[in-house]
Amino acid sequence: MYTVQNFFNTGDGALGSGAASLSGLDPILFSGADDITLHGCSAGDGERSMAQLLADHLGLPLNGSVGPTVFSGVKNGKPGEGLPRVVPDNYNGDVYLVPQYNDRGFQTYQPRTN
């Protein structure tokens, strides 16, 4: 799984590809990717969503959330499942972003051709 945030410019030049926008993101960075998922809230919501624009730019299918996401301690689990009621700063267990609502999960976006 690829985490998109690692490929953008952080402002201090410490991380990322130096891309300040999608158009500056080199699609070669994702070559060989078999699963690209955007876990941010509503990353796939709308005609010009981040998920659709990134799929178009990369020429690859990807998944994006069409609604809000929340934390779970279980992959594909329910919100808060498997997490302590209050998560301490030093928590080192697994944490996943999952859809907050059952009817607003993840959707696959295919690249559109111009």
Image (cartoon, helix red, strand yellow):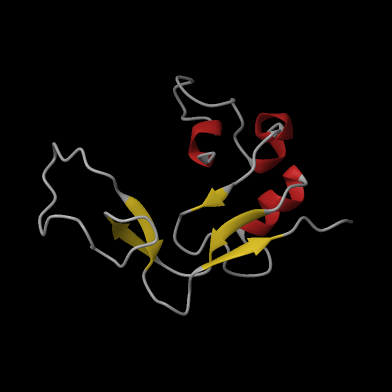
Front residue (pair 63, 8) = 63
Front residue (pair 114, 3) = 3
**Residue in view at x 47 percent, y 80 percent:** 103
Instruction: Please state if 4 lies on the left or on the right of 52 as rendered.
Output: left
Front residue (pair 15, 12) = 15
x then y, percent, for residue 19: 61, 31
Residue 89, image quadrant: top left
Front residue (pair 9, 42) = 42
**Residue in view at x 49 percent, y 33 percent:** 6
90 lies above or below 49: above
User: Residue farthest to the right?
Assistant: 114
**Residue in view at x 72 percent, y 30 percent:** 28
Q: Quadrant of the C terminus?
A: bottom right
**Residue in view at x 59 percent, y 35 percent:** 20
User: Residue farthest to the top?
Assistant: 14
x then y, percent, for residue 9: 53, 30
Residue 50, visible in the rendered structure: no
